Image (cartoon, grey):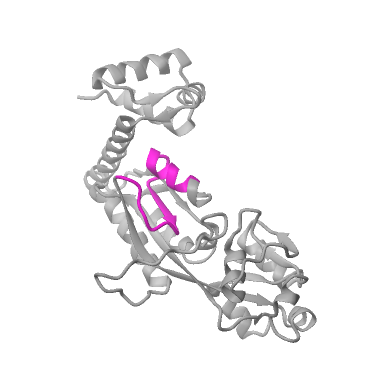
Amino acid sequence: MLNMLQLETFAAVVEHRSFRKAAASLNISSGAVTRRIKALEQSIGTLLLIREPTVALTKAGEDVLRYLISVRLQEDALLRRVMPDTVATTALALAVNADSLATWFEPVARELARHHVTLEIVVDDQEHTLKMLARGDVRGCLSTQHRPVDGFLAEPVGQMRYQCVATPEFACKHFAGGMALANVLKAPAVLFDRKDTLHDTFLESRFGVAVGRYVKHYFPAPISLLNAILDGLGYGLVPAMQAEPLIGHGKLVVLAPEHDLMVDLYWHHRESEPEPLAKLNALIVHGARRSLIQPAPMGKDAVARSSCIGRDGERV
Protein backbone atom coordinates (compact mmCIF):
# COMPACT_ATOMS: atom_id res chain seq x y z
CA MET A 1 0.00 0.00 0.00
CA LEU A 2 1.44 3.33 -1.05
CA ASN A 3 1.53 6.12 1.52
CA MET A 4 -1.04 8.77 0.54
CA LEU A 5 0.78 11.52 2.43
CA GLN A 6 3.89 10.81 0.40
CA LEU A 7 1.86 10.67 -2.81
CA GLU A 8 0.22 14.04 -2.13
CA THR A 9 3.65 15.53 -1.40
CA PHE A 10 4.90 14.05 -4.66
CA ALA A 11 1.96 15.64 -6.49
CA ALA A 12 2.73 19.03 -4.93
CA VAL A 13 6.34 18.87 -6.13
CA VAL A 14 5.16 17.98 -9.64
CA GLU A 15 2.62 20.80 -9.64
CA HIS A 16 5.08 23.47 -8.50
CA ARG A 17 8.18 22.00 -10.20
CA SER A 18 10.02 22.84 -7.00
CA PHE A 19 10.65 21.17 -3.63
CA ARG A 20 10.76 24.56 -1.92
CA LYS A 21 7.46 25.78 -3.40
CA ALA A 22 5.83 22.45 -2.65
CA ALA A 23 6.94 22.78 0.97
CA ALA A 24 5.42 26.27 1.17
CA SER A 25 2.12 25.05 -0.30
CA LEU A 26 1.96 22.20 2.24
CA ASN A 27 3.16 24.32 5.19
CA ILE A 28 6.06 21.97 5.92
CA SER A 29 9.83 22.26 5.61
CA SER A 30 11.76 21.54 2.42
CA GLY A 31 13.56 18.80 4.34
CA ALA A 32 10.26 17.11 5.13
CA VAL A 33 9.32 17.19 1.42
CA THR A 34 12.66 15.65 0.50
CA ARG A 35 12.29 12.88 3.09
CA ARG A 36 8.77 12.01 1.93
CA ILE A 37 9.81 11.84 -1.74
CA LYS A 38 12.82 9.67 -0.90
CA ALA A 39 10.65 7.37 1.19
CA LEU A 40 8.13 7.06 -1.66
CA GLU A 41 10.88 6.25 -4.15
CA GLN A 42 12.34 3.67 -1.78
CA SER A 43 8.96 1.99 -1.30
CA ILE A 44 8.48 1.75 -5.08
CA GLY A 45 12.10 0.92 -5.75
CA THR A 46 12.82 3.45 -8.46
CA LEU A 47 13.49 7.15 -9.10
CA LEU A 48 10.32 9.18 -9.64
CA LEU A 49 11.71 12.69 -10.03
CA ILE A 50 14.70 14.17 -11.81
CA ARG A 51 16.01 16.91 -9.50
CA GLU A 52 18.41 18.82 -11.76
CA PRO A 53 18.56 21.12 -13.66
CA THR A 54 14.80 21.40 -13.10
CA VAL A 55 12.32 19.07 -11.44
CA ALA A 56 10.87 16.63 -13.99
CA LEU A 57 9.05 13.31 -13.93
CA THR A 58 10.69 10.05 -14.87
CA LYS A 59 8.65 7.46 -16.77
CA ALA A 60 7.88 5.74 -13.47
CA GLY A 61 6.94 9.13 -12.01
CA GLU A 62 4.42 9.65 -14.83
CA ASP A 63 2.83 6.31 -13.98
CA VAL A 64 2.64 7.18 -10.28
CA LEU A 65 1.09 10.58 -11.02
CA ARG A 66 -1.48 8.97 -13.30
CA TYR A 67 -2.29 6.48 -10.53
CA LEU A 68 -2.76 9.27 -7.99
CA ILE A 69 -5.09 11.23 -10.26
CA SER A 70 -7.10 8.05 -10.82
CA VAL A 71 -7.38 7.54 -7.06
CA ARG A 72 -8.54 11.13 -6.57
CA LEU A 73 -11.21 10.79 -9.25
CA GLN A 74 -12.45 7.49 -7.84
CA GLU A 75 -12.54 8.94 -4.33
CA ASP A 76 -14.54 11.95 -5.49
CA ALA A 77 -17.02 9.69 -7.30
CA LEU A 78 -17.42 7.57 -4.16
CA LEU A 79 -18.00 10.58 -1.92
CA ARG A 80 -20.65 11.96 -4.26
CA ARG A 81 -22.46 8.60 -4.17
CA VAL A 82 -22.47 8.11 -0.39
CA MET A 83 -22.68 11.79 0.57
CA PRO A 84 -24.52 13.65 -2.22
CA ASP A 85 -24.12 17.03 -0.50
CA THR A 86 -20.34 16.73 -0.38
CA VAL A 87 -18.49 19.12 -2.65
CA ALA A 88 -15.74 16.84 -3.92
CA THR A 89 -13.64 18.16 -6.78
CA THR A 90 -10.49 17.04 -8.55
CA ALA A 91 -8.09 19.44 -10.24
CA LEU A 92 -7.91 18.88 -14.00
CA ALA A 93 -5.41 20.71 -16.20
CA LEU A 94 -5.99 20.83 -19.97
CA ALA A 95 -3.94 22.46 -22.72
CA VAL A 96 -5.74 24.17 -25.61
CA ASN A 97 -5.02 26.82 -28.20
CA ALA A 98 -6.20 30.40 -28.00
CA ASP A 99 -8.67 30.41 -30.89
CA SER A 100 -10.42 27.26 -29.68
CA LEU A 101 -10.75 28.69 -26.19
CA ALA A 102 -12.18 31.89 -27.65
CA THR A 103 -14.80 30.02 -29.69
CA TRP A 104 -16.07 26.48 -29.17
CA PHE A 105 -14.02 25.21 -26.21
CA GLU A 106 -15.29 27.69 -23.62
CA PRO A 107 -18.82 26.20 -23.41
CA VAL A 108 -17.27 22.72 -23.31
CA ALA A 109 -15.09 23.82 -20.38
CA ARG A 110 -18.15 25.09 -18.52
CA GLU A 111 -19.81 21.71 -19.04
CA LEU A 112 -16.72 19.95 -17.70
CA ALA A 113 -16.71 22.16 -14.60
CA ARG A 114 -20.19 20.87 -13.74
CA HIS A 115 -18.71 17.37 -13.37
CA HIS A 116 -17.03 18.15 -10.05
CA VAL A 117 -13.61 19.09 -11.40
CA THR A 118 -11.68 22.29 -10.94
CA LEU A 119 -10.26 23.29 -14.30
CA GLU A 120 -6.93 24.80 -15.22
CA ILE A 121 -6.89 25.76 -18.91
CA VAL A 122 -3.35 26.18 -20.20
CA VAL A 123 -2.86 28.10 -23.46
CA ASP A 124 0.48 27.38 -25.10
CA ASP A 125 2.13 26.43 -28.37
CA GLN A 126 1.99 22.94 -29.82
CA GLU A 127 5.49 21.81 -28.85
CA HIS A 128 5.05 22.81 -25.23
CA THR A 129 1.53 21.44 -24.83
CA LEU A 130 2.54 18.02 -26.11
CA LYS A 131 5.53 17.96 -23.78
CA MET A 132 3.30 18.98 -20.87
CA LEU A 133 0.93 16.17 -21.73
CA ALA A 134 3.70 13.58 -21.94
CA ARG A 135 5.21 14.47 -18.57
CA GLY A 136 1.85 14.67 -16.80
CA ASP A 137 1.41 18.43 -16.36
CA VAL A 138 -1.94 18.30 -18.19
CA ARG A 139 -4.40 15.48 -18.72
CA GLY A 140 -5.40 16.37 -22.28
CA CYS A 141 -4.16 18.51 -25.11
CA LEU A 142 -5.76 20.05 -28.20
CA SER A 143 -3.29 20.13 -31.06
CA THR A 144 -2.79 20.23 -34.82
CA GLN A 145 -0.33 17.34 -34.41
CA HIS A 146 -1.93 14.12 -35.66
CA ARG A 147 0.78 11.81 -34.32
CA PRO A 148 0.44 11.02 -30.60
CA VAL A 149 3.37 10.51 -28.27
CA ASP A 150 3.90 7.03 -26.85
CA GLY A 151 1.10 5.91 -24.57
CA PHE A 152 -1.40 8.48 -25.87
CA LEU A 153 -4.19 8.68 -28.43
CA ALA A 154 -4.80 11.53 -30.88
CA GLU A 155 -8.50 11.58 -31.71
CA PRO A 156 -9.49 13.66 -34.77
CA VAL A 157 -12.21 16.06 -33.67
CA GLY A 158 -12.75 18.17 -36.79
CA GLN A 159 -11.54 21.15 -38.75
CA MET A 160 -11.49 24.82 -37.84
CA ARG A 161 -12.13 27.18 -40.76
CA TYR A 162 -10.36 30.52 -41.03
CA GLN A 163 -11.35 33.41 -43.28
CA CYS A 164 -9.11 36.26 -44.43
CA VAL A 165 -11.09 39.40 -43.58
CA ALA A 166 -10.90 43.17 -43.31
CA THR A 167 -13.29 46.07 -42.91
CA PRO A 168 -14.94 47.28 -46.15
CA GLU A 169 -13.01 50.56 -45.88
CA PHE A 170 -9.66 48.78 -45.47
CA ALA A 171 -10.45 46.46 -48.39
CA CYS A 172 -11.30 49.40 -50.67
CA LYS A 173 -8.12 51.23 -49.71
CA HIS A 174 -5.64 48.35 -49.95
CA PHE A 175 -7.31 45.70 -52.12
CA ALA A 176 -9.50 47.65 -54.54
CA GLY A 177 -8.25 45.55 -57.44
CA GLY A 178 -8.38 42.26 -55.55
CA MET A 179 -5.94 40.46 -53.30
CA ALA A 180 -2.84 40.70 -55.48
CA LEU A 181 0.62 39.86 -54.18
CA ALA A 182 1.86 43.44 -54.71
CA ASN A 183 -0.89 44.73 -52.42
CA VAL A 184 -0.21 42.06 -49.79
CA LEU A 185 3.41 43.20 -49.50
CA LYS A 186 2.27 46.72 -48.59
CA ALA A 187 -0.97 46.26 -46.62
CA PRO A 188 -0.54 45.73 -42.85
CA ALA A 189 -1.57 42.31 -41.60
CA VAL A 190 -2.68 41.46 -38.05
CA LEU A 191 -1.04 38.36 -36.58
CA PHE A 192 -1.18 36.69 -33.19
CA ASP A 193 2.52 36.89 -32.27
CA ARG A 194 5.97 36.24 -33.77
CA LYS A 195 5.38 32.49 -33.66
CA ASP A 196 2.20 32.85 -35.70
CA THR A 197 2.64 30.78 -38.88
CA LEU A 198 -1.01 30.65 -39.86
CA HIS A 199 -0.86 33.83 -41.96
CA ASP A 200 2.27 32.65 -43.78
CA THR A 201 0.56 29.33 -44.53
CA PHE A 202 -2.46 31.17 -45.94
CA LEU A 203 -0.37 33.43 -48.18
CA GLU A 204 1.63 30.51 -49.53
CA SER A 205 -1.56 28.58 -50.31
CA ARG A 206 -3.05 31.70 -51.94
CA PHE A 207 -0.07 32.65 -54.15
CA GLY A 208 1.89 29.42 -54.45
CA VAL A 209 5.08 30.96 -53.05
CA ALA A 210 6.38 31.68 -49.55
CA VAL A 211 5.79 35.31 -48.58
CA GLY A 212 7.98 36.45 -45.72
CA ARG A 213 8.37 40.21 -45.92
CA TYR A 214 5.13 42.07 -45.33
CA VAL A 215 3.91 44.64 -42.81
CA LYS A 216 2.71 43.05 -39.56
CA HIS A 217 0.95 44.00 -36.35
CA TYR A 218 0.93 41.57 -33.40
CA PHE A 219 -2.07 41.23 -31.06
CA PRO A 220 -1.57 38.08 -28.92
CA ALA A 221 -5.20 37.42 -27.98
CA PRO A 222 -8.05 36.37 -30.29
CA ILE A 223 -10.39 39.20 -29.27
CA SER A 224 -7.60 41.79 -29.51
CA LEU A 225 -6.64 40.52 -32.96
CA LEU A 226 -10.26 40.70 -34.12
CA ASN A 227 -10.74 44.19 -32.67
CA ALA A 228 -7.59 45.41 -34.40
CA ILE A 229 -9.03 44.26 -37.72
CA LEU A 230 -12.41 45.86 -36.91
CA ASP A 231 -10.60 49.12 -36.10
CA GLY A 232 -9.04 49.10 -39.57
CA LEU A 233 -5.47 48.52 -38.42
CA GLY A 234 -5.00 45.67 -40.87
CA TYR A 235 -6.43 42.51 -42.33
CA GLY A 236 -6.02 38.98 -41.02
CA LEU A 237 -7.21 35.43 -40.51
CA VAL A 238 -10.13 34.97 -38.12
CA PRO A 239 -12.03 31.79 -37.20
CA ALA A 240 -15.20 31.63 -39.26
CA MET A 241 -17.18 31.20 -36.02
CA GLN A 242 -16.16 34.75 -35.11
CA ALA A 243 -16.07 36.28 -38.58
CA GLU A 244 -19.36 35.15 -40.12
CA PRO A 245 -21.74 37.18 -37.89
CA LEU A 246 -19.64 40.30 -38.55
CA ILE A 247 -19.61 39.58 -42.29
CA GLY A 248 -23.39 39.22 -42.18
CA HIS A 249 -23.71 42.66 -40.57
CA GLY A 250 -21.40 44.28 -43.11
CA LYS A 251 -18.62 45.02 -40.62
CA LEU A 252 -16.16 42.70 -42.34
CA VAL A 253 -15.64 41.43 -45.89
CA VAL A 254 -13.86 38.28 -47.07
CA LEU A 255 -10.77 39.10 -49.10
CA ALA A 256 -10.18 35.63 -50.55
CA PRO A 257 -13.54 33.81 -50.71
CA GLU A 258 -12.09 30.77 -52.46
CA HIS A 259 -9.16 30.39 -50.08
CA ASP A 260 -10.54 29.67 -46.62
CA LEU A 261 -7.95 27.87 -44.52
CA MET A 262 -9.00 24.55 -43.02
CA VAL A 263 -7.02 23.29 -40.02
CA ASP A 264 -7.31 19.80 -38.54
CA LEU A 265 -7.57 19.44 -34.77
CA TYR A 266 -6.83 16.43 -32.56
CA TRP A 267 -7.57 15.75 -28.90
CA HIS A 268 -4.59 13.99 -27.26
CA HIS A 269 -5.08 11.94 -24.11
CA ARG A 270 -3.86 8.76 -22.44
CA GLU A 271 -4.82 5.47 -24.06
CA SER A 272 -6.03 4.08 -20.74
CA GLU A 273 -7.88 6.38 -18.35
CA PRO A 274 -10.06 5.73 -15.28
CA GLU A 275 -13.79 5.91 -15.95
CA PRO A 276 -14.39 9.44 -14.58
CA LEU A 277 -11.60 10.87 -16.75
CA ALA A 278 -12.59 8.80 -19.77
CA LYS A 279 -16.06 10.35 -19.51
CA LEU A 280 -14.58 13.86 -19.50
CA ASN A 281 -12.47 13.05 -22.56
CA ALA A 282 -15.62 11.83 -24.31
CA LEU A 283 -17.39 15.09 -23.46
CA ILE A 284 -14.55 17.11 -24.97
CA VAL A 285 -14.46 15.03 -28.16
CA HIS A 286 -18.25 15.23 -28.50
CA GLY A 287 -18.25 19.00 -27.93
CA ALA A 288 -15.51 19.52 -30.50
CA ARG A 289 -17.19 17.39 -33.15
CA ARG A 290 -20.47 19.17 -32.54
CA SER A 291 -18.89 22.57 -33.25
CA LEU A 292 -16.12 21.89 -35.77
CA ILE A 293 -16.40 20.96 -39.43
CA GLN A 294 -16.28 17.21 -40.01
CA PRO A 295 -14.41 16.27 -43.19
CA ALA A 296 -15.54 13.39 -45.38
CA PRO A 297 -14.06 10.10 -44.10
CA MET A 298 -11.06 8.72 -45.97
CA GLY A 299 -10.71 5.17 -47.19
CA LYS A 300 -8.77 2.64 -45.15
CA ASP A 301 -5.79 2.81 -47.47
CA ALA A 302 -5.75 6.59 -47.81
CA VAL A 303 -2.80 8.48 -46.44
CA ALA A 304 -3.77 10.97 -43.76
CA ARG A 305 -2.98 14.47 -44.91
CA SER A 306 -0.79 16.69 -42.80
CA SER A 307 -2.32 19.42 -40.70
CA CYS A 308 -1.10 22.90 -41.30
CA ILE A 309 0.57 24.46 -38.29
CA GLY A 310 -1.50 27.12 -36.60
CA ARG A 311 -0.83 30.26 -34.64
CA ASP A 312 1.52 29.93 -31.75
CA GLY A 313 2.26 26.48 -33.17
CA GLU A 314 -1.12 25.54 -31.71
CA ARG A 315 -3.47 28.46 -32.23
CA VAL A 316 -6.13 26.80 -34.35
Q: Which residue does the image show at 69% across and 80% down from the upper left? A: 179
Across and down, in percent, residue 292 comes to 43, 71
The extreme left residue here reads: 1
Across and down, in percent, residue 114 comes to 38, 55
Across and down, in percent, residue 281 comes to 32, 55
Classify residue 259 as left or right of residue 292. right
Q: Magenta stretch?
A: 128-150
Give the quadrant of residue 137: top left
Q: Which residue does the image show at 55% across and 58% down from the upper left? A: 98
Q: Is residue 302 visible?
A: yes
Q: Which residue does the image show at 61% across and 64% down from the upper left? A: 200
The front one of 202 and 293 is 202
Q: Is residue 163 visible?
A: no
Across and down, in percent, residue 30 comes to 47, 16
The front one of 78 and 150 is 150
The front one of 307 and 301 is 301
Q: Which residue does the image show at 31% across and 45% down from the upper left? A: 150
Give the quadrant of residue 299: bottom left
Q: Is residue 84 on the magenta stretch?
A: no
The extreme front residue here reads: 209
Classify residue 68 as left or right of residue 195. left
The front one of 132 and 28 is 132
Quarter of the picture holding the N terminus: top left
Residue 297 position (above or below residue 200): below
Q: Is residue 147 on the magenta stretch?
A: yes
